[in-house]
């Protein structure tokens, strides 16, 4: 696991100053504390920071191919590199190292861009072919590893693993994109189709770019997608056996490392399944790491402890205070772009604990998206069934009116919180699911925005690209479309961003075995009934893991990391709530209404409404923009 950065002159070939590339990679030193390197040639420069995982002494980067005709900087791991290497050697390829990086170079020289479909792993890399004078940029199928891009004055493209790598270049403009604020206030993060700065973009998951000197930059090309258009044949028992095989393959392939390796263990289904299969495959106790909270109602350490005992792991746990708001500035610095998923705080804590014992940790990320584990997916499936029997001409007026009249009662028991469901039923399936996934609905955002942002935003709404993605999904059912959107939009933008940044911030490599692409592709072919059965999500996975895990682990309600935002803004952060409502960055800019933000803070502090999540969004937005130091 590493950090990469570089420059490419696509208009005219100009010299690249190695010190500029070095400054960009130095900004990513946390991603690669074990080594660094820079390589330049006319019109191109590649930089690398290394976290040594495989072939600890023998694979420095930037790395040249055996014949010296290609150079690469690579962030990630290729899990099938040994099998791929044997195949390439049979074709005459020669290798000087024992790692996976050189395998990518040889694969490129044999297959060109088609080499990507042969790589099983998580990766973002930049490869320069000196003979063809081409720069090849690529990102893995599901977006586990990031790659930011920026066009600079004079016809140059800069790239880096994190935005801070680009910001180290002196010619980077720091102009905030107002549409990114609309996206962020809707989702709580800036999705991969946009970046917080105007001249910055992100290479989408499953895409590549091929650049040449003297030619304009072409849009990214998609090289992988997941389809839900087909259904797996056979019985549930057959599917269970196949799922177990794929889960085992995903886990064992990610246990290859020349450094200490362990796992995150929350006591939930996903991480417990990973630990179970690691223990099955290992001849020594698995190192497992958990964090708990000093508030009993949100503490899951007893479940993690039970799983650790069941499999005899070398277990480490730490109890932390639920009051972690002292890390706000650190979180803003880690993510660069505004990021309001408050579970980033406890995720950082468990990464810190894991790094004390291991260098690589396996996580349970991705199972909810791939195998339908979110409650919102179950609601979407039921709502789509209701939509199918009631014409839209009737649904709109009936459910829309009821939804507008129904009180918003986040404090009430779930059966009484019907406002979102009623409003969702009045809309299309795509619009309804966007509402379910969003933090703030369009009418809620409208009240908060100032005149300047409303004018700059124009007709754009953050839901539009999300709904278009769902409509175009290669899918057969409403559940398919929901999962496709989660895999393509939510997963790379929120879940994988959170894990990548928090793990890399402490020099830890996180691997996601349940996002093995063969497992994801298989899960997309499962019948709806094997994904969700009754009120049980991830049904086939839970049924499959019954041979390993007890029922109170498999079938207890999903919890996840909990951060008490509402209490914070009525307690220790009450002054922050008042201050952010009058922030010059948010209000004087015209982006937000001073009156609306003041009312938001007053209502929350006074206990008349719960705006804790929105106040957290605003606070993280303000802190991130302040750190970015936007240009006038």
Image: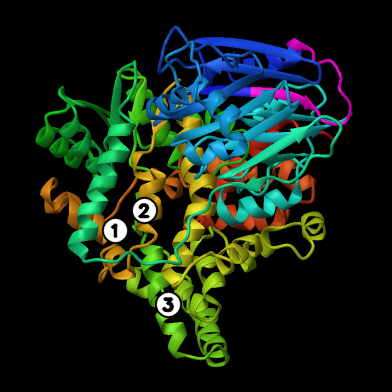
Left or right of 18 in this view: 10:
right
Magenta-highlighted residues: 5-18
Q: Does any portion of residue 129 appear in the rendered image?
A: yes
Q: Quadrant of the C terminus?
A: top right
Asked whether the residues under the numbered discs 1 and 2 touch, taking CB atoms below 8 Å apart as contact, a structural biologist would say: yes
The residue that disc 2 covers is: 368
Name the mark on residue 383: 3
The residue that disc 1 covers is: 538
Q: Residue at x 39, y 33 (%)?
A: 511
Dot 2 lies on which element? helix
Check the image and name the residue furthest to the top.
57
Percent across and percent down for residue 578 are: 61, 45
Percent across and percent down for residue 40 are: 73, 13
Asked whether 316 or 572 is in front, the reply is: 316
Q: Does any portion of residue 298 appear in the rendered image?
A: no
Percent across and percent down for residue 201 are: 70, 41
**Quadrant in the picture for residue 146:** top right
Left or right of 143 in this view: 195:
right
Left or right of 600 in this view: 590:
right
Asked whether 196 or 625 is in front, the reply is: 196
Spatial CA span between label 1 and label 2: 7 Å
**Marks 3 and 2, the one that precedes in the sequence:** 2
How many other residues sit within 10 Å of disc 2, few (<14), some (14-19) or many (≥20)? Answer: many
Asked whether 518 or 616 is in front, the reply is: 518
How many other residues sit within 10 Å of disc 3, few (<14), some (14-19) or many (≥20)? Answer: many
């Amino acid at each position: 696991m590493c950090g990469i950065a570089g420059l490419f002159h696509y208009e005219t070939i100009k010299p690249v100053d190695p010190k500029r590339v070095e400054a960009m990679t130095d900004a990513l030193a946390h991603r690669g504390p074990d080594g660094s390197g820079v390589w330049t040639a006319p019109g191109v420069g590649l930089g690398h920071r290394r976290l040594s995982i495989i072939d600890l002494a023998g694979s420095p980067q930037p790395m040249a191919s055996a014949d010296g005709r290609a150079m690469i900087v690579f962030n990630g791991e290729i899990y099938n590199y040994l099998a791929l290497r044997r195949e390439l050697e049979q074709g005459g390829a020669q290798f000087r190292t024992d790692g996976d990086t050189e395998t990518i170079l040889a694969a490129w020289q044999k297959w060109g861009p088609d080499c990507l479909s042969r790589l099983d792993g998580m990766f973002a890399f930049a490869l320069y072919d000196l003979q063809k004078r081409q720069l090849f940029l690529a990102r893995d199928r599901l977006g586990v590893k990031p790659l930011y891009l920026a066009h600079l004055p004079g016809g140059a493209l800069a790239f880096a693993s994190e935005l801070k790598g680009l910001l180290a270049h002196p010619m980077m403009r720091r102009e905030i994109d107002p549409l990114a604020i609309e996206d962020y206030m809707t989702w709580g993060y800036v999705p991969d189709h946009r970046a917080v700065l105007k001249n910055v973009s992100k290479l989408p998951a499953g895409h590549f770019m091929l650049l040449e000197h003297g030619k304009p930059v072409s849009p990214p090309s998609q090289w992988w997608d997941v389809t839900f258009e087909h259904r797996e044949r056979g019985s549930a028992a057959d599917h269970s056996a196949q799922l177990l095989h794929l889960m085992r393959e995903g886990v064992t392939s990610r246990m290859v490392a020349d450094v200490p390796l362990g796992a995150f263990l929350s006591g939930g289904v996903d991480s417990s399944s990973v630990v179970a299969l690691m223990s099955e495959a290992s001849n020594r106790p698995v190192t497992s790491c958990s964090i708990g909270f000093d508030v009993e109602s949100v503490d899951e350490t007893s479940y993690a402890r039970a799983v650790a005992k069941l499999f005899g792991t070398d277990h480490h746990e730490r109890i932390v205070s639920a009051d972690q708001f002292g890390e706000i500035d650190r979180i803003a610095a880690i993510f660069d772009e505004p990021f309001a998923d408050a579970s980033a705080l406890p995720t950082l804590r468990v990464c810190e604990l894991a790094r004390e014992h291991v260098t690589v940790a396996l996580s349970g990320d991705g199972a909810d998206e791939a195998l339908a584990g979110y409650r919102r997916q179950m609601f979407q499936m039921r709502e789509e069934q209701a939509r199918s029997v009631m014409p839209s001409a009737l649904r709109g007026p009936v459910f829309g009116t009821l939804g507008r009249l129904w009180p918003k009662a986040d404090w009430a028991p779930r059966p009484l919180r019907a406002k979102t469901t009623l409003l969702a039923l009045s809309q299309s399936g795509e619009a309804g699911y966007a509402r379910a996934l969003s933090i703030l609905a369009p009418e809620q955002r409208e009240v908060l925005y100032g005149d300047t942002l409303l004018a700059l935003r124009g007709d754009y709404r953050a839901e539009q690209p999300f709904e278009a993605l769902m409509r175009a999904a290669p899918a057969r059912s409403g559940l398919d479309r929901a999962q496709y959107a989660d895999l393509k939009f939510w997963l790379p933008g929120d879940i994988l961003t959170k894990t990548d940044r928090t793990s890399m911030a402490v020099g830890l490599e996180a691997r996601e075995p349940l996002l093995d692409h063969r497992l994801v592709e298989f899960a997309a072919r499962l019948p709806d009934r094997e994904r969700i059965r009754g009120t049980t999500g991830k049904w086939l996975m839970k049924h499959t893991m019954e041979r390993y895990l007890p029922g109170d682990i498999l079938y207890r309600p999903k919890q996840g990391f909990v951060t008490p935002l509402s209490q914070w803004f009525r307690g220790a952060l009450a002054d922050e709530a008042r201050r952010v409502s009058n922030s010059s960055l948010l209000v004087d800019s015209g982006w937000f209404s001073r009156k609306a933000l003041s009312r938001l803070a007053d209502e929350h502090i006074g206990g008349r409404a719960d705006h804790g999540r929105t106040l957290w969004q605003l606070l993280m937005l303000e802190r991130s923009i302040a750190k970015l130091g936007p240009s006038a």
